[in-house]
Image: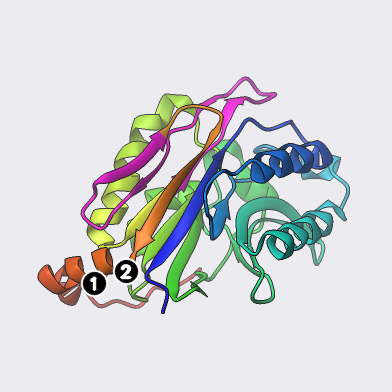
Amino acid sequence: MNHKLKLALVQSSLVWEDPEQNRLNFEKLINNISEDTNVVVLPEMFTTGFTMTPENIANDEGAKTVSWMKSIARDKGIALMGSISFWEDQKYTNRLFFVSDKAAPVHYDKRHTFTLAGEDMVYEAGKAKLIVEYMNFVLCPMICYDLRFPVWARNTENYDALIYVANWPKPRIDAWDTLLKARAIENMAYCIGVNRIGQDINGYEYCGHSAAYDCLGNQLCFTEDETVVYTTLERQHITATRDKLNFLGDKDSFNLVIQ
């Protein structure tokens, strides 16, 4: 049984609505990963930036990106994850793909579309969480604005880690820092957040703050730079913390009604 899962968090600027160039840029960053890695995490909408005009992008670009992810996962022997603007069944979704060398791709559609930017008017909201088992670790991927909604993230599945991908702007970065730590503590799980940096075409600035926290809320890594940072999930930490502090055993029971 694997007792450790090694993650590479790729924090980068994005080229606006240019999937091909973004794929090339991220491929270079992935090829330069310097440490042994099992899972590579990319930001939200990593091929376009946080666009509300997905009609500017060819409808087949989503499929091209998934093929690209599959190729890298196969060649590197890793899993790769991040969200993209995706066209399917005559609608757009902000869709996170988890693509591994070991199984068929799976996906999660962003549940909480960002109404402040009108995302709810452009992208169809998701209706189900995604729980991924990879190398004997249970992961729960989510997207950006989902971070503000603790009921949706509640650890009812006994997952080992929450992983958020984001385009979280600089003016509200304190909320990002605080909520990532809170989600780790309340769910007694690792919590990882991967954000972008740079400025988009609308003038919004992003300062990164990609980070990882352990089950007690201790920060394991953090960066404001255009770089790759690394963190390791350790089975011993999860087991020892939950055995000593059985807070999840006292959690509330509820049924979530999806509307």
What x and y, as percent, mark residue 185?
Answer: 23, 55
Query: Tag 2's secondary structure?
Result: helix
What x and y, as percent, mark residue 216?
Answer: 21, 54
- Whether residue 185 is visible, yes or no, is yes
Range of residues picked out in magenta: 193-222
Query: Tag 1's secondary structure?
Result: helix
Asked whether 118 or 215 is in front, the reply is 215
Q: What residue type is labelled 2?
A: Arg
Spatial separation of the CA atoms under disc 1 and disc 2: 6 Å
Q: Is residue 123 left or right of residue 214?
A: right
Within 10 angstroms of label 1, few (less than 14), some, or many (20 or more) residues?
few
What x and y, as percent, mark residue 248?
Answer: 20, 71
Q: What residue type is labelled 1?
A: Thr
Label annotation for residue 239: 1
Check disc 2 and report the residue beneath it: 235
Q: In this view, does 108 lie to the left or right of 207?
A: right
Q: In which quarter of the image is residue 45?
A: top right
